[in-house]
Image (cartoon, rainbow, N blue to C red):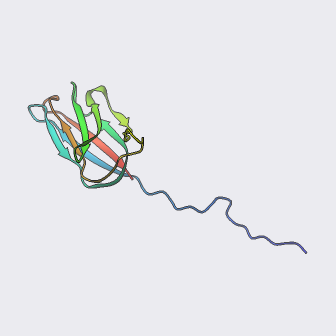
Amino acid sequence: MAIHTWGFPQTPVIKPPRPVYVTKVACTTDESGNCNTNSRFINGQILKIYYGKGTVTATTTATVTFEGESIDSYNVNTGSAHRYPRVETILEPFVVSGPINIAVTGGQASKTFDVYIFSR
């Protein structure tokens, strides 16, 4: 007598990963080269930040913060870039729950660029 086995899936059944959300923050510097913009509410890990150069043609450093703690800082004039900020002491992604602030002080006047925040 042969033993009958039922066809079980060859791969383990796992919970699907949580979706990745993208938040676009449009930044426009004023006549003095300053910008201070908040994102919409973000809840979760910051996986990466993408800086789109836009119309910037001179040194314009964008600083991304959450509740006063610096997450990342990047000179947008060096070109568009993907950045992967991590908490220095444990090398894990930042976890936030609230709006993220993008600030520029002393940048190029009347220019625009975009910051995309990828979170899960």
The spot of residue 68 in percent (x, y) is 22, 44
Q: Is residue 69 left or right of residue 84?
A: left
* Residue 10 against residue 2 in the figure, above or below: above
Residue at the extreme left:
31
Q: Quadrant of residue 42?
A: bottom left
In this rendering, does residue 80 appear at all? yes
* Residue 77 against residue 89 in the figure, above or below: above
The spot of residue 114 in percent (x, y) is 26, 40
The spot of residue 60 in percent (x, y) is 21, 29
Q: Nearer the viewer, residue 105 or 24?
A: 105
In this rendering, does residue 55 appear at all? no
User: Can you say which quadrant of the picture contains the N terminus?
Assistant: bottom right
Q: Residue at x 81, y 72 (%)?
A: 4
* Residue 40 against residue 3 in the figure, above or below: above
Q: Residue at x 68, y 60 (%)?
A: 10
Q: Residue at x 37, y 38 (%)?
A: 88
Residue at the extreme top:
58
Residue at the extreme front:
89
Q: Quadrant of residue 35?
A: top left
Q: Nearer the viewer, residue 119 or 65?
A: 65
The spot of residue 76 in percent (x, y) is 27, 31
Q: Residue at x 60, y 63 (%)?
A: 13
Q: Is residue 81 left or right of residue 6?
A: left
Residue at the extreme right:
1
